[in-house]
Amino acid sequence: DSGVTQTPKHLITATGQRVTLRCSPRSGDLSVYWYQQSLDQGLQFLIQYYNGEERAKGNILERFSAQQFPDLHSELNLSSLELGDSALYFCASSEIHLPQHFGDGTRLSIL
Amino acid sequence: DQQVKQNSPSLSVQEGRISILNCDYTNSMFDYFLWYKKYPAEGPTFLISISSIKDKNEDGRFTVFLNKSAKHLSLHIVPSQPGDSAVYFCAASRVGGSGAGSYQLTFGKGTKLSVIP
């Protein structure tokens, strides 16, 4: 158990819809990272928050957004969903630097 | 443009023998490298890391070697055990000297290791 909690584990929705994925980092960790793993792809970095502020952005679509709340949990919002958004979404956390510790992911299926 | 490459999608090794997993990178700005292990339906689990100022790091049965001139790193598992069967991901980061890096990880696509009893 990494100590990083992601909910829900599975999410099934339709194209055009909006979903929110939630992540609770390990106790004491200030940084939260979001990654996307599509079929046949490695994990792709989406976005990082550090102590409530956005620190870095990767190849995150404009339809996606995230935030980190004062209690340090984070939410990833995905809107206007397309079939290609079907993927595993992982959250990771770290105290400040590396290594990052990963949750078990949310599997998003778009029908 | 894949900056971290794991060219072997799969590897089979007999129990007790050495497993060697390889990883190549193209971005010379990467200065910190990690290996993660992933079981099905679980998230990646951190195994071992190495900074670019070193060429070797050991932790129990796991050793990571870094060849900066070749932009190549490898993970050695000795002896291999059936419980080591998993997908192994190589990851790289640009930490930088100021510590102001974002520490985002760039991952390879993984190598599936099967350890045969």
Image: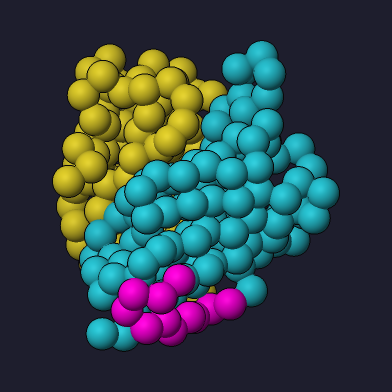
Is residue B10 located in the magenta-colored stretch of the structure?
A: yes
Answer with left or right where residue B22 lies relative to residue A53. right
Whether the magenta-drawn stretch holds residue B100 is answered as no
Determine whether B111 is above or below B4 in the image.
Answer: below
In the rendered image, is residue A58 in sight?
Answer: no
Residue at 42% across, 54% down: B62
Among the chains pictured, the one given yellow colouring is A
The one of A64 and A7 positioned closer to us in this rendering: A7
Relative horizontal placement of residue A104, taking residue A92 as reference (left or right): left
What's the colour of chain B in the image?
cyan
The tally of labels here is 0
| Residue appearing at x 58%, y 77% in the figure | B8
Identify the residue at horizontal 62%, vertical 28% (top origin).
B95
Is residue B38 something one can see in this rendering? yes
Find the magenta span and give its range: B8-18
The one of A10 and B18 positioned closer to us in this rendering: B18
